[in-house]
């Protein structure tokens, strides 16, 4: 019994050691390449447990298959029409074909060197086919920024896949700039444009204010005129109503006019008047003598 | 086992040994045998404990802010939803390493990433300086290596400025903040590069640090791509929400394209400014815009006051009604009845005049009709009486009366000194 246990234990150890020597794991985040005496024999891109001849017959080379980002330096290039622009392009890439990658590149560092030159080449070629107005334009329908990025991606994708076993997942321009001297001109233009708008704003403000005030004056004038017209109508109605009462004076117009004259005289001489009179004016002639009166029978 | 050892030891004893020596050896053998037996038992116990510990190491917990994947020989275990282990109150058991490996992904944590690469270069000293001093130190140009900025399109002009075509552009500085989280642990684990976690490292920090360059590049790309579609005024004031939304969509699209398993939670433009080099011109426009508002506001006040003085609150409505030929008489009368101000005074004056004229005419007529019968009976006396009464009243009101010799001219001076106020007004003023 004891011998059996010992035997099982030893067999177990041997099996574990044997498995350790002839198996290897490929994780979800990796791909692997098996070489036999240095010559690549198998490419493993699916994760799981794999079998190999023990070292030194077969060796496993592992590659991280996850996405990595690489950006080229900020570089100046020219658009169609020779407008210089400064761009910074990045790529998101992964090792897709370990064998091709190992043969053509070897390491991630070396891959980045290759990518740098390829990105620069693609950048210059594709951007050179597009005018600056396709990057930025006052007419948004003419902006082709995303299309240019896509064009650069498809250009680069094929090249690096065929040559280096690298898959470029995406590409983009993360900085779009202009040269130092050009910025000064841009500022001059920005200032000029702003100054124009300032002047326009000031004149617009004055114009609007004048219009508002003018409208207000016009409205008030219209309203006052309308009120006066309405007042005239009311006065007219008053005069018409008054005229109805004057009909009653037809019975003795002379007497009516006498009364009216008396009334007017009183009104006219009501205040601050000076009168010069002859001495025989009624009733001042009484000042001269006593009148001779006889009673009427 | 000890018995076997004992027998084995006995077999090895030389036949030449004497009896006492044999007894001594038996005692030593026994001791050795006993020691070996105990050691073997201890070894068994240790092995059992180690096996148990090995198995127990398969118990794993998933934190409340995490989700986990189990790799069996490097491949994600399970199918469908079972591939991802979610937090629960009791632990999971997985085969210990090297069979299974549990990878925990923090899915609930939201991480902020600030982008300052579109801001002008500032040293620590410049950051702390007063804005006025900062402006004094401004260079006439921007250095593309050190100064960051975004390019925005210019306003669409009816007539483009000569030579510029339609590709005029402006420059704006901005700072952004991205808040993101992992929403698809499997995609994130399999596709996004994360550095190896070394002893002492915090896994979450390693993740954050590893994905920052990727996110920064994608985020900056989205900002540059979106900003060229907006004007500087859109970025500064009018379309901030639209721009932010566009950046968010572009970034999420990129993240989905590369199957990153990352989600944009929020994007904010945390700061923005026009270049310091054009500050004066931009400030002048801001001031002019404010002045414009003030001027218009004052004009509106004037309009309101003028109309209010003329016709009261109903002024505008009445004005519009006067222009409207279709408005009914009733509606018009209703508006006139609500009138106030100067116009109302004019209407009131007219009404007063009407009342006065009518009343005066009526009074005159009545007075005349009252006197007429008496006048017909004694015309001379009535005339004389009325005349004398009137003369009395007139002379009593006249300031000065002169009686001049016969034959001299006599004249009446009415209101001879306009500066003199009427007596009743003098009294009121006194």
Image: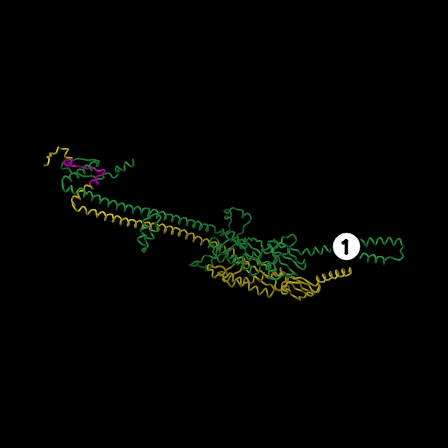
Q: Chain A is drawn in which colour?
A: yellow
Residue placed most toward the observer, B203 or B32: B32
Left or right: residue A107 versus residue B338 is right
Which quadrant of the figure contains the N terminus of chain A? bottom right
**Image location of residue A9, percent across then percent down:** 75, 60
Q: Which chain is assigned green?
A: B
The stretch drawn in magenta includes residue A71: no
Q: How crowded is mark 1: few (under 14 residues within 10 Å), some or many (20 or more)?
A: few
Magenta span covers which residues? A265-283
Residue placed most toward the observer, A98 or B51: B51
Quick check: B194 above or below B370? Answer: below
Question: From where the camera sits, is residue A11 visible?
Answer: yes
Which of the 4 image quadrants contains residue A95? bottom right
**Image location of residue A241, percent across then percent down:** 23, 48
Chain of the residue under the numbered disc 1 shown in the image? B
The stretch drawn in magenta includes residue A275: yes
Q: Is mark 1 on a helix, strand or loop?
A: helix
Quick check: B412 above or below A132? Answer: above
**Image location of residue B27, percent across then percent down:** 85, 53
Which quadrant of the figure contains the C terminus of chain A? top left
Residue under pointer 1: B41
Left or right: residue A12 versus residue B345 is right
Which of the 4 image quadrants contains residue A94? bottom right
């Amino acid at each position: 019994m004891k011998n059996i246990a010992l035997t099982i234990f030893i067999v177990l150890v041997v099996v574990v050691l044997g498995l350790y020597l002839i198996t290897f794991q490929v994780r979800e985040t990796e791909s692997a390449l098996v070489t036999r005496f240095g010559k690549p024999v198998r490419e493993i891109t699916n994760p799981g447990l794999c079998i190999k001849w023990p070292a030194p017959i077969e060796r496993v080379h592992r590659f991280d298959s996850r996405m990595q980002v690489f950006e080229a330096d900020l570089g100046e290039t020219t658009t169609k029409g020779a407008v210089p622009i400064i761009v910074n392009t990045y790529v998101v890439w992964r090792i897709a074909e370990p064998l091709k990658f190992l043969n053509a590149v070897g390491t991630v560092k070396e891959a980045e060197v290759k990518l740098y030159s390829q990105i620069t080449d693609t950048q210059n070629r594709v951007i050179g086919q597009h005018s600056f107005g396709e990057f930025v334009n006052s007419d948004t329908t003419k902006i082709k920024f995303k299309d240019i990025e896509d064009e650069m991606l498809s250009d680069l994708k094929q090249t690096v896949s065929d040559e280096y076993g690298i898959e470029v997942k995406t590409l983009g321009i993360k900085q779009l700039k202009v040269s130092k001297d050009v910025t000064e001109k841009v500022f001059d233009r920005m200032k000029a444009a702003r100054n124009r708008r300032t002047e326009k704003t000031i004149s617009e403000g004055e114009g609007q204010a004048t219009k508002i005030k003018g409208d207000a004056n016009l409205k008030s004038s219209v309203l006052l005129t309308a009120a006066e017209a309405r007042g005239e109508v009311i006065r007219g109605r008053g005069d018409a109503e008054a005229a109805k009462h004057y009909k009653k004076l037809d019975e003795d117009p002379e007497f009516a006019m006498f009364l009216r004259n008396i009334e007017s005289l009183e009104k006219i001489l009501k205040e601050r008047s000076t009168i010069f009179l002859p001495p025989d004016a009624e009733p001042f002639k009484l000042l001269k003598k006593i009148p001779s009166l006889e009673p009427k029978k | 086992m000890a018995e076997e050892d004992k027998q084995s030891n006995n077999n090895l004893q030389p036949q030449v040994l004497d009896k006492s020596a044999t007894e001594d050896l038996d005692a030593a053998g026994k001791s050795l045998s006993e020691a070996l037996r105990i050691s073997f038992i201890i070894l068994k116990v240790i092995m059992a404990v180690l096996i148990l510990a090995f198995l127990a190491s398969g118990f794993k917990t998933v934190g409340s802010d995490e989700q986990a994947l189990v790799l069996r020989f490097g491949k994600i275990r399970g199918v469908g939803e079972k591939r991802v282990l979610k937090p629960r109150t009791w632990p999971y058991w997985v085969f210990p390493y090297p069979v299974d490996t549990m990878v925990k992904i923090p899915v609930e944590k939201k991480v902020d990433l600030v982008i300052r690469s579109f801001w002008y270069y500032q040293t620590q000293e410049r950051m702390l300086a007063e804005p006025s001093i900062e402006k004094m130190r401004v260079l006439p140009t921007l250095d593309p290596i050190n100064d960051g900025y975004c390019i925005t399109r210019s306003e669409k002009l009816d007539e483009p400025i000569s030579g510029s075509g339609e590709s005029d552009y402006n420059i704006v500085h901005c700072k952004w903040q991205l808040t993101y989280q992992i929403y698809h642990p499997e995609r994130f684990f399999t596709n996004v590069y994360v550095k190896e976690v070394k002893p002492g490292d915090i896994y979450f920090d390693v993740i954050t640090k590893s994905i920052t360059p990727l996110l920064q590049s994608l985020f900056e790309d989205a900002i540059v791509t979106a900003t060229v579609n907006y004007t500087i005024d859109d970025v500064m004031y009018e379309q901030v929400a639209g721009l932010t939304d566009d950046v968010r969509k572009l970034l999420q699209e990129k993240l989905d394209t590369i199957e990153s398993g990352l989600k944009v939670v929020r994007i904010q433009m945390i700061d923005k400014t026009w270049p310091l080099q054009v500050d004066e011109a931009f400030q002048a426009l801001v001031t002019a815009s404010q002045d414009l508002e003030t001027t218009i506001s004052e004009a509106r006040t004037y309009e309101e006051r003028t109309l209010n003085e003329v016709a009261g609150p109903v002024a505008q409505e009445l004005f519009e009604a006067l222009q409207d030929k279709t408005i009914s008489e009733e509606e018009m009368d209703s508006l006139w009845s609500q009138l106030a101000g100067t116009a109302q005074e004019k209407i009131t004056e007219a009404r007063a005049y009407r009342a006065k004229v009518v009343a005066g005419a009526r009074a005159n007529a009545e007075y005349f009709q009252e006197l007429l019968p008496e006048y017909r009976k004694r015309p001379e006396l009535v005339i004389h009486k009325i005349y004398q009464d009137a003369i009395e009243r007139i002379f009593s009101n006249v300031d000065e009366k002169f009686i001049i010799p016969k034959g001299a001219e006599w004249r009446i001076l009415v209101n001879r000194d306009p500066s003199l106020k009427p007596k009743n007004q003098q009294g009121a003023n006194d």
